[in-house]
Amino acid sequence: MNGVQVPYTDFAKMHDPLRGELDAAWKRVMDQEWFIGGAEDQAFEEEFAALCGAKFCVGVGNGLDALRLILLAAGVQEGDEVLVPANTFIASALAISYVGARPVLVDPDQETALITPQEAEKHITEKTKAIMPVHLYGRMAEMEGFADLAARHHLLLVEDAAQAHGALRQGKGPAAWGLAAGYSFYPGKNLGALGDAGAVITNDPELARRVRALSNYGSEVKYHHEWAGVNSRLDEVQAALLRVKLPHLPAWTAERRRIAAAYEAGIQNPKIRLLRQAEGNVYHVFPVFTQERDALQKHLEQAGIHCLIHYPIPVHLQQAYADLGYRRGDFPVAEELAETELSLPLYPGMTEEQIQHVIQQVNSF
Ligand SMILES: *Cc1c(COP(=O)(O)O)cnc(C)c1O
């Protein structure tokens, strides 16, 4: 019996070495007695924009709001259609629904789990207003192709970068290609807060200004409201904690890549398929695919290895979206991925023994 335990993720590995700094950050906010929209928020926005290689960052309450505020600021509204993958976390689609527009789903490519410009183009109608590629699992979508598609059809290009902190394609990160990218700092993301948080990254000063106002009741001058906005701000405590973690993101990403490289080299099992390798991948999730997914999950669970499924139900089969009128069979690739995907543990601080245990157990399935 091998007694090695492998949790899906292990926050302590990241947080324990930073415990003193995290405690100090929280105390600093207590002492400052300024809890919303202060110095920590501003400093984090500057630091995260720099990491993303972009001009503007606006901190918001969470990743869903980051996406919804971009669409709201860009004037996407009822009657509009927005293209989005069928195989994403439901928040991508919900951001579109929230502004009153219709999510128009696109089936992904089987080898990358990402939508392609070619497939997206088939769904463009006279109502299409925007395209929202999702950089799923930390893999950048084919952004040069999407930028070209958006330009040819006069569409807005908005990226869901909730799983892609620090990801690059042709040396450029999300938001270099279109209007803006939405990020999440949900605790489990590659850069996670100790609670909910999110950000909009853009190079467009007008979009940044509008998102900031919309996130703060549509107001730029206190008690003067230019737009009917919402309340979705990044609070000082989360900003201060994120500032402690942010400088470590490049090293954590390098570690994720090192573990992923070990998996890619070591996993050899004819029953198990990996995605095609992608440049600039930050490996938020390491998915494997097999027709016997539930049996594989059980096999790994019995070996002390805890896996997750991203995601078991595609957007078009969610009850919340029954009114879109889609049916089983409409997005065969998204459905197959949902039935066959299993996410292996991959996190900074995994030991060599844990990594080898995962590889061995996957191979012995
Ligand atoms: C996490 C996530 C979101 C939503 O972020 P929250 O901060 O949880 O609101 C949106 N899209 C994708 C792809 C995500 O993984």
Image (cartoon, helix red, strand yellow):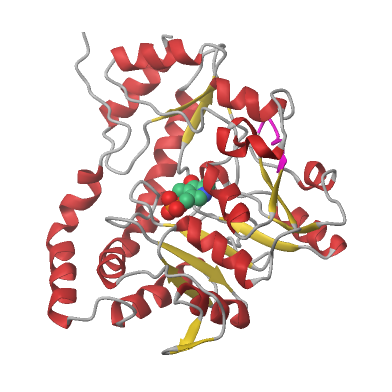
Please provide percent x and percent y for residue 264: 50, 29
**Left or right: where does residue 264 sit relative to residue 44?**
right
Lateral position of residue 41 relative to residue 132, left or right: left
Q: Position of residue 211 (x, y in %)?
A: 54, 74
User: Which residue is at a point 46% across and 65% down the rendered structure image?
Assistant: 199
Main SS type for the magenta part? loop
Specify start and end residues of the magenta stretch as a single range.
Answer: 105-111
Question: In this orientation, which residue lies closer to the viewer: 202 or 84?
Answer: 84
Q: Nearer the viewer, residue 207 or 56?
A: 207
Residue 23 can be seen, yes or no? yes
Decide whether residue 110 is among the magenta residues: yes
Does residue 179 show up magenta in the picture? Answer: no
User: What residue sits 65% from the left and 30% below the top?
Assistant: 334
Query: Would you identify the image quadrant in which residue 181 lies?
Result: bottom right
Q: Which corner quadrant of the image does residue 320 belong to?
A: top right
Position of residue 140 relative to residue 333, above or below, is: below
Q: Residue at x 20, y 45 (%)?
A: 12
Count of labels shown?
0
- Between residue 300 and residue 325, name the one nearer to us: 325
Quadrant hosting residue 29: bottom left
Whether residue 166 is visible here, answered yes or no, is: no
